[in-house]
Image: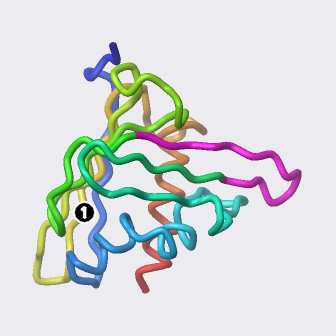
Amino acid sequence: MIDVSKGFTLVRTFEASPEEVWKAWTDPDAAAQWWRPRGTTTPRETVEMDTQVGGRYTYTMVNDAVGNKVVTGGVYREVVPFERLVFTWGHPDGDPDDTPVITVTLEPVNEGTRMTFDLRGVEGAEGDGSFHDGWQEVLDSLENYMK
C-alpha cells in the first residue's frame, strides 16, 4: 500500500476555461503535445486514454537526446468532468493499490482556471531533480500548451 503521507501539491492558474484544461488532461491528441518533462517527446501513437472510472491510460516519453523510453500509465479512479480527475500513476501493469495517485482539481477563477495538482505516494520537494521537479516541468509544458 502506498504511503499517502508522502507527496506534494502544485498549483497553476491558466487563462483558459476548466473545459479547455480538462480536455488537455483527457484528450490523447492534446496530452501527446504536453504530457512530458523538458528534453522528451510523447509520440501521439503511444497515448491511449479511456477516461472513465476503472478505465486505463498509457503514454510513452522518449528522451530526445538518447532515445530512452519510459512507459507510464494507470487507472482512473474518479472522473468528474471539468472539475476533478483522480488516477494512479506508474507502470501501466502495476498494482493500482500500490501505485502513486494524482488528483487534478479544476476551479474557475476570474483569470481562467486554477488547477491543483496533488501527487500522493512518493516524496517530492523543489530541487529534488526527481518527482517534484519533473512534474513542475510537465506543468510548464501544459502552461505553454494552454497559451
Quarter holding the C terminus is: bottom left
Dot 1 amino acid type: Met
Vertical position of residue 40 compared to residue 94: above or below? below
Q: In this view, does 40 lie above or below 97?
A: below
Q: Which residue is at the front of the view, 125 or 96?
A: 96
Of the 4 image quadrants, the one containing the N terminus is top left
Q: Is residue 91 above or below residue 23?
A: above
Check disc 1 and report its element: helix, strand or loop.
Answer: strand
In the rendered view, does 111 fall on the left or right side of 121? left
Please give left or right for residue 19 compared with residue 24 in the image. left
Q: Residue at x 51, y 38 (%)?
A: 131
Q: Residue 75: x percent and y percent?
A: 37, 41
Residue at 88% from the left image edge and 51% from the top image edge: 66
Colour theme: rainbow
Determine which quarter of the picture holds residue 98: top left
- Numbered-mark total: 1
- Residue nearer the viewer, 74 or 18: 74
User: What's the magenta bit mostly, secondary-structure-wise?
Assistant: strand
Instruction: Give x and y (percent) for residue 50.
Output: 38, 56
Residue that sits furthest to the top in the current view: 1
Q: Position of residue 3 (x, y in %)?
A: 31, 17
Does residue 100 lie above or below 84 as drawn? above
User: In the rendered structure, which segment of residues is drawn in magenta?
Assistant: 61-74
Q: Nearer the viewer, residue 105 or 14?
A: 105
Residue with the mark numbered 1: 115
Question: Does 21 appear in magenta?
Answer: no
List x then y, in percent, for residue 44: 62, 69
Q: Residues within 10 Å of mark 1 (few under 14, many from 20)?
A: many
Relative placement, left or right, of 56 versus 66 is: left
| Residue at horizontal 55 percent and vertical 33 percent from the top | 91
